[in-house]
Amino acid sequence: MSGLFITFEGGEGAGKTTVLQQVKEKFEQDGMQVIATREPGGSVIAEKVRDVILDPLHTEMDARTEALLYAAARRQHLVETVIPHVKKGGIVLCDRFVDSSLVYQGVARGIGIDEVLQLNLFATEGMMPDLTLYFDVKPEVGLARIAEHKGREFNRLDQESIAFHHKVRKAYLHLQEREPKRIHTIDASEQIGDVLTKSLQEIQAFMEKKTT
């Protein structure tokens, strides 16, 4: 099988990072060549950009500056981590990608989806995921999970209002309607075991379809 690029998307506290790691472990047990990575980050340079973007002290950061920094980190991450692994026939599981920028900067920050999309198409040279799992949960539930999770990093996005997070969820649902073949919705309000099972089913069905 040729390589696969699968992204995990969702609002704060949706549980996508936990599920991604569990999917990786399952694939490794099955003998698959798989890596887990994240955005912003996923390479030495991109991780340094991540520190700048998510620093809780950088509250004065302009929305367009933020969008540009995300795109810059994404480019470096792609060329250093994602593309080489996919070219070798491996599976890349990525925590966030372009859809996050469309939602957070394009909609929630008010820059515009098309404007942010054009910026990111330049950064990625048009590369998009083969499959995207969107973990849907009400913002109140996701933020409550974060409050209970003491070990999670506190970043600048955690300081946003509940109205901001509602915009994020609405934008994700809109993107799923625009690209139903690529973006598959997972009910993230369920127990983590059920969410994992559904995620694996979605990925397996996609992989089987891809090989037929």
Image (cartoon, grey):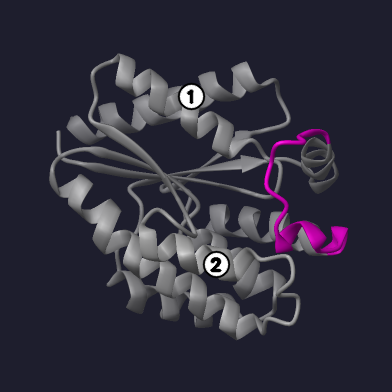
Q: Quadrant of the C terminus?
A: top left
Q: Is residue 102 visible?
A: no
Mark 1 and mark 2: span between their CA atoms?
Answer: 25 Å
* Badge 2 amino acid: Ser
Q: Which of 151 and 194 is in front in this view?
A: 151
Q: Residue sitting at 23 percent across and 35 percent down? A: 210
Q: Which disc, if any, is residue 101?
A: 2
Assess whether mark 2 and mark 1 are in contact (beta carbons under 8 angstroms). no
Residue 143, percent from left and from top: 81, 45
Q: Does the magenta stretch include residue 160?
A: yes
* Badge 1 amino acid: Gln
Residue 117, percent from left and from top: 46, 74
- Secondary element at tag 1: helix
Q: Which disc, if any, is residue 133?
A: none
Q: Residue sitting at 56 percent across and 59 percent down? A: 175
Residue 28, percent from left and from top: 31, 21
Picture mark count: 2
Q: Residue sitting at 55 percent across and 60 percent down? A: 100
Q: Is residue 75 visible?
A: yes
Q: Residue sitting at 67 percent across and 41 percent down? A: 136
**Residue underneath mark 1:** 22
Q: What stretch is highlighted in magenta?
A: 148-163
Which mark is nearer the camera, 1 or 2? 1
